[in-house]
Image: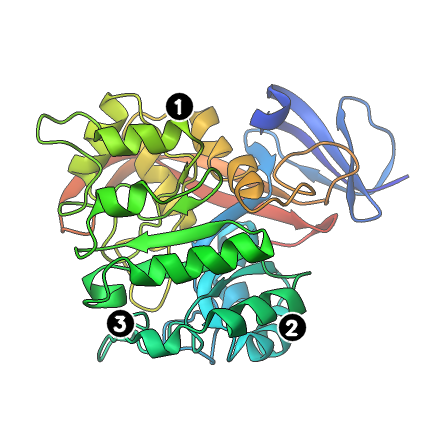
C-alpha cells in the first residue's frame, strides 16, 4: 500500500518528457510510481484540474534567518510557495557556516543546501539600513578557510559563491573571482558568480567562468546586461553558453529587467534556471517569491514546460543533486501542486517598470518526503 497518491492531475515532468493526466504515488518517503490505477493508499489527494510537477527548487535564496541581516525564515517562505528545496546563495562563509547549519538548516522542514561564500563572514552587511560589499576588502577572502569549511561540510555544500561588482566587491575588480575559482577548483564544486555594476565588466567575468559554473542575475538591466546595443545577445554570453556555463535569473531587488528579458527571449535565449533571490529587501517586492518570478516568464511567453524545467530539474542538475528535480520512481518524494490562475495581474521589474498579465502560478499543495506538506 502507498502512503499517498495524488489523483488525476496534469503531471508535467520535463526530465521524463511527461505531460499528461496521471496519478503520482509515494511510499517510504520516495516517489513510488506515476501512472494510472496505482493501487491502494493510506491517503489520497484530488489533484484534478491542477498541475503536478516535481518539487520546486529555488536556486538563489538567502535563508540564514536570524544569523544574517538579509536572511528570511526558510519554512515561512517555502511552504506557501510549494518549494521543497531551497539553495542558499552564499549567505554564510567559513566563519559562520556551522551556525547556519545547526540553527537553521538542521531545524527547518524544507530541504536547504547552501553555497559557501568565499568571504569568511559571508554576506554580513546587507540590510534595509546600509550595504557593505563583503568582497571589497580582500583581507576577508581567505581561500584556505573556505576550502577547509567546504571539506568539513562536504555533505551539505553545493558550491562556492562570490559577489562581484560595485555593490558586492567595491573596487576590488576581478580579484575576488580568482580567489573563489581557486577554491572551487580545489574542492571540485561549481562557482556561482553574482555580477552587478562594474567594475569588473561582464566580458571579464564571462571569459573566466568554467563549464558548470553559474552566472546569477543573468537578465540584469544595463550596465553589465547580456543584451547588445542592437538587442542581440552579447558574443561573450553566447560563447559562455556554448561551453556550458549555467544562466540563472536571481531576480532579487536589482537584477531582473523586462526589457532585458524580452530581448533575450526574442533571441531564443531562455535562462537555464529561474530563481527568486529572495531576501529581506526583495521578499516584499519586486521579486516576492519563486512563483512570482516563474509567472513573469509565463507572461513573457516562455513555454510552460520550460518554466517548469527551469524550476525543477535544471536547478537540481546545476548543483549536482541527482535525487530530486524529477518524479522518477525511487527519488525523493517531493512534488508541488500548482494552478495557473487567470485574472488581471501586475508584474514589476527592478526598475519599476510594470506589465499587466492574465495568468500567474498559485500553489495548491506540496508533498515533502512523501507526505502532504502544504
- Quadrant of res 329: top right
Precedes in sequence: disc 3 or disc 2: 2
- Above or below: residue 288 compared with residue 236: below
Instruction: Give how far apart the Cα atoms at labels 3 and 1 are.
Output: 40 Å
- Above or below: residue 359 compared with residue 301: below
Instruction: Give how far apart the Cα atoms at labels 3 and 2 are.
Output: 32 Å
Q: Residues within 10 Å of mark 3 (few under 14, many from 20)?
A: many
Secondary structure beneath disc 2?
Answer: loop
Residue at left offset 60%, top offset 77%: 98
Which of discs 3 and 2 lies nearer the camera? The answer is: 3
**Which residue is more in the foreground, 360 or 190?**
190
Residue to which mark 1 is pinned: 303
Q: Residue furthest right?
A: 1
- Above or below: residue 132 compared with residue 361: below
Instruction: Give how far apart the Cα atoms at labels 1 and 2 are.
Output: 36 Å
Secondary structure beneath disc 3?
Answer: loop
Residue to which mark 2 is pinned: 107
- Above or below: residue 157 compared with residue 290: below
Precedes in sequence: disc 1 or disc 2: 2
Quarter of the picture containing the N terminus is top right
Q: Residue furthest left?
A: 229
Residue at left offset 59%, top offset 60%: 157
User: Answer yes or no: do the residues labelled 3 and 1 have beta carbons within 8 Å?
Assistant: no
Q: Is residue 158 left or right of residue 35?
A: left
Q: Is residue 149 visible?
A: yes
The image position of residue 284, as x and y in percent, is: 30, 62
Q: Is residue 88 visible?
A: no
Residue to which mark 3 is pinned: 136
Amino acid at each position: 500500500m502507498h502512503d499517498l497518491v495524488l489523483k488525476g492531475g496534469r503531471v508535467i515532468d520535463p526530465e521524463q518528457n511527461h505531460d499528461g493526466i496521471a496519478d503520482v504515488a509515494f511510499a517510504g518517503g520516495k516517489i513510488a510510481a506515476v501512472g494510472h490505477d496505482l493501487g491502494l493508499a493510506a491517503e489520497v489527494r484530488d489533484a484534478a484540474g491542477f498541475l503536478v510537477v516535481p518539487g520546486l527548487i529555488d536556486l538563489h535564496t538567502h535563508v540564514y534567518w536570524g544569523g544574517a541581516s538579509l536572511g528570511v525564515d526558510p519554512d515561512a517562505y517555502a511552504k506557501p510557495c510549494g518549494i521543497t528545496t531551497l539553495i542558499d546563495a552564499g549567505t554564510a562563509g567559513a566563519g559562520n557556516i556551522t551556525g547556519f547549519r545547526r540553527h537553521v538548516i538542521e531545524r527547518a522542514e524544507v530541504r536547504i543546501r547552501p553555497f559557501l561564500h568565499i568571504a569568511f563572514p559571508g554576506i554580513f552587511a546587507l540590510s534595509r539600513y546600509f550595504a557593505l560589499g563583503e568582497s571589497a576588502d580582500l583581507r576577508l577572502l581567505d581561500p584556505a578557510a573556505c576550502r577547509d569549511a567546504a571539506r568539513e561540510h562536504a555533505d551539505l555544500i553545493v558550491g562556492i559563491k562570490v559577489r562581484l561588482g560595485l555593490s558586492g566587491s567595491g573596487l576590488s575588480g576581478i580579484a575576488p573571482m580568482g580567489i573563489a575559482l581557486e577554491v572551487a577548483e580545489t574542492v571540485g564544486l561549481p562557482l556561482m558568480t553574482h555580477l552587478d555594476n562594474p567594475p569588473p565588466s561582464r566580458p571579464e567575468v564571462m571569459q573566466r567562468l568554467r563549464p558548470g559554473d553559474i552566472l546569477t542575475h543573468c537578465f540584469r538591466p544595463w550596465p553589465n546586461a547580456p543584451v547588445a546595443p542592437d538587442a542581440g545577445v552579447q558574443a561573450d554570453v553566447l560563447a559562455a553558453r556554448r561551453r556550458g556555463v549555467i544562466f540563472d535569473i536571481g531576480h532579487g531587488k536589482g537584477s531582473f529587467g523586462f526589457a532585458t528579458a524580452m530581448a533575450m527571449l526574442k533571441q531564443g535565449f531562455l535562462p537555464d534556471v529561474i530563481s527568486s533571490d529572495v531576501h529581506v529587501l526583495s521578499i516584499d517586492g519586486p521579486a516576492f517569491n519563486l512563483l512570482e518570478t516563474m509567472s513573469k516568464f509565463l507572461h513573457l511567453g516562455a513555454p510552460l514546460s520550460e518554466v517548469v524545467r527551469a524550476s525543477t530539474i535544471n536547478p537540481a542538475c546545476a548543483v549536482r543533486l541527482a535525487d530530486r528535480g524529477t518524479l522518477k520512481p525511487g527519488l525523493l518524494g517531493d512534488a508541488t501542486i500548482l494552478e495557473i490562475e487567470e485574472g488581471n495581474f501586475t508584474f514589476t521589474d527592478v526598475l519599476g517598470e510594470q506589465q499587466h498579465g492574465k495568468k500567474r502560478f498559485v500553489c495548491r499543495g506540496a508533498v515533502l518526503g512523501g507526505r502532504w506538506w502544504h
